[in-house]
Image (cartoon, helix red, strand yellow):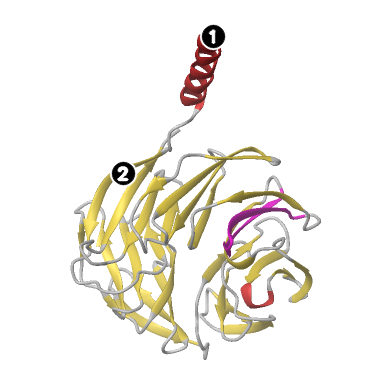
C-alpha cells in the first residue's frame, strides 16, 4: 500500500512538472552602458531608426542605444530625466526633467534640443493620446498637464489628489485611469470634461505605481508594492476581478494583447509574466531572475522584444538586456 501511494505521489508530481510552463521571455543579447551610474528610469523606442532611449536620472542623461550596432552612442543631456516619449512623426523625443520641472523636446535626426515646455515641477510620466494628438504629463503634488503635440503648447491642467504615477488612456473610450499612490486610489478622468468622475481603491493594497490596460476586455491592471500584488479591475464598474502575488518593487507593467499576457519588471530582481487567456482568468508563469534594481522595462509589440534596464550595482555593470517574447 505504501509503495502504491508513493507511486501515485510520484505520478502526480511528474504531471505537475510536465504541466508547469516555462517563461516565454528568452534573453537574446546584452548591450553595455559603460558611462552610466545610478538608477535607470523609463525607456522609449525609435522603430524606424532602431534606437532605444534610456533615462538615467542620476547620470543626468538620456542614453542613446544603437540596437543594430549593439552599443551606446553619445547621450542627450537632461537634468534628472524620468520618462521619454518618441513620436516618429515628426521624429521628436519628449523627455521629462524632474530637476528643471519641464518637458524637453529633441529633434531625433539632429539629436539636439529644440523646445522646452511648461513649468511642471517634478515632471514624471508621459503618455500620448494619439487620436486627439495630445501628450499628458504627470507632475507636481497632483496634476496631469495636457500638451498639444502639434504646437508644443501646454493647454490644460487636471488636478488630482496626489502625485500621479503610471496612467493609461483609452483609445476608443473617453477616460484616463491614473494611479495616485498618496491617495491610495485610481482616479478615473473623463477627457471631455477633464474631471475626476470616480476613484477606485486597489483593494487593501497600497503603493499603486504601475498600470496597464486591456481596453478590448475592459480590464485595468494595477501593480502595487505594499504588499507586492497585481490587481485586476473591471473598467465598467471598478470591481476587483482578480489579485495575484508578484515579486517586489514593480515599476513597469505592460499588456501584450496579441499573446494575452502581462509583463512586469521588478526591482527585487525578476521579470514577471502572467497569462491572461480571458478577462476573468490569470495564471502566473515562472519568474525570470534578472538583477536587483532592474525595475524598468519596455515591451515593443511589433518586434516582439522586451528591453530591461539594468543599473550598475557592485559587480553588476549597467546594461540593457534584450528578451525575445515567445509565442
Q: Is residue 47 visible?
A: no
Q: Can you tell which of label 1 and label 2 is closer to the viewer? A: 1
Q: In the image, is residue 230 above or below residue 137?
A: above
Specify whether residue 229 is painted magenta: yes
The chief SS type of the magenta part is: strand
- Classify mark 2: residues with Cα within 10 Å, few (<14), some (14-19) or many (20+): some
Q: Secondary structure at mark 1?
A: helix
Q: Identify the residue at image location x=46%, y=40%.
A: 286
Q: Image quarter for residue 294?
A: bottom left
Quadrant showing the N terminus: top right
- Would you say residue 62 is visible in this rendering? yes
Q: CA distance from mark 1 to mark 2?
A: 42 Å
Quadrant that contains the C terminus: top left
Q: Label 2, secondary structure: give it.
A: strand
- Expressed as whole percent of the image width and height from the top left, the position of residue 225 reads 55, 64
Residue 292 image point, x, y percent: 35, 60
Residue at left 43%, top 50%? 271
Identify which residue, 6 or 29, lies in the foreground.
6
Mark carried by residue 27:
2
Q: Which of 17 and 130 lies nearest the eye of the viewer? A: 17
Work out whether residue 52 or residue 320 is closer to the camera in this orientation and state it: 320
**Residue 87: horizontal and vertical position, in percent?**
45, 65
For the record, the magenta segment spans 218-235
Q: Is residue 278 left or right of residue 268?
A: right
CB of mark 1 within 8 Å of CB of mark 2?
A: no
Point out the tag, 1 or 2, that comes first from the N-terminus: 1
**Quarter-of-image position of residue 266:** bottom left
Query: Residue 222: percent from the left, percent from the top?
Result: 62, 59
What residue is at 36 percent from the left and 76 percent from the top? 106
Residue matched to label 1: 4
Within the magenta stretch, is there residue 317? no
Amino acid at each position: 500500500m505504501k509503495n502504491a501511494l508513493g507511486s501515485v505521489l510520484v505520478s502526480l508530481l511528474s504531471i505537475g512538472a510536465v504541466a508547469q510552463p516555462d517563461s516565454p521571455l528568452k534573453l537574446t543579447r546584452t548591450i553595455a552602458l559603460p558611462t552610466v551610474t545610478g538608477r535607470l528610469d523609463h525607456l522609449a523606442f525609435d522603430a524606424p531608426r532602431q534606437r532605444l532611449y534610456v533615462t538615467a536620472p542620476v547620470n543626468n542623461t538620456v542614453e542613446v542605444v544603437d540596437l543594430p550596432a549593439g552599443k551606446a552612442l553619445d547621450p542627450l543631456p537632461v537634468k534628472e530625466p524620468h520618462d521619454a516619449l518618441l513620436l516618429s512623426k515628426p521624429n521628436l523625443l519628449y523627455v521629462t526633467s524632474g530637476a528643471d520641472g519641464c518637458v524637453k523636446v529633441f529633434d531625433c535626426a539632429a539629436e539636439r534640443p529644440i523646445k522646452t515646455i511648461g513649468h511642471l515641477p517634478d515632471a514624471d510620466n508621459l503618455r500620448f493620446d494619439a487620436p486627439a494628438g495630445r501628450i499628458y504629463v504627470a507632475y507636481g503634488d497632483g496634476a496631469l498637464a495636457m500638451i498639444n503635440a502639434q504646437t508644443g503648447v501646454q493647454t490644460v491642467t487636471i488636478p488630482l489628489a496626489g502625485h500621479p504615477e503610471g496612467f493609461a488612456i483609452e483609445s476608443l473610450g473617453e477616460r484616463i485611469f491614473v494611479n495616485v499612490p498618496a491617495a491610495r486610489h485610481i482616479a478615473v478622468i473623463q477627457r471631455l470634461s477633464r474631471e475626476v468622475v470616480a476613484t477606485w481603491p486597489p483593494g487593501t493594497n497600497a503603493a499603486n505605481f504601475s498600470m496597464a490596460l486591456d481596453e478590448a476586455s475592459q480590464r485595468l491592471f494595477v501593480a502595487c508594492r505594499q504588499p507586492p500584488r497585481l490587481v485586476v479591475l473591471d473598467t465598467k464598474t471598478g470591481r476587483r476581478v482578480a489579485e495575484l502575488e508578484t515579486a517586489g518593487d514593480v515599476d513597469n507593467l505592460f499588456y501584450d494583447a496579441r499573446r494575452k499576457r502581462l509583463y512586469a519588471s521588478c526591482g527585487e530582481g525578476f521579470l514577471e509574466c502572467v497569462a491572461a487567456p480571458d478577462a476573468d482568468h490569470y495564471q502566473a508563469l515562472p519568474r525570470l531572475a534578472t538583477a536587483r534594481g532592474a525595475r524598468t522595462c519596455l515591451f515593443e509589440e511589433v518586434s516582439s522584444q522586451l528591453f530591461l534596464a539594468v543599473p550598475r550595482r557592485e559587480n553588476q555593470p549597467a546594461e540593457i538586456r534584450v528578451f525575445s517574447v515567445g509565442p
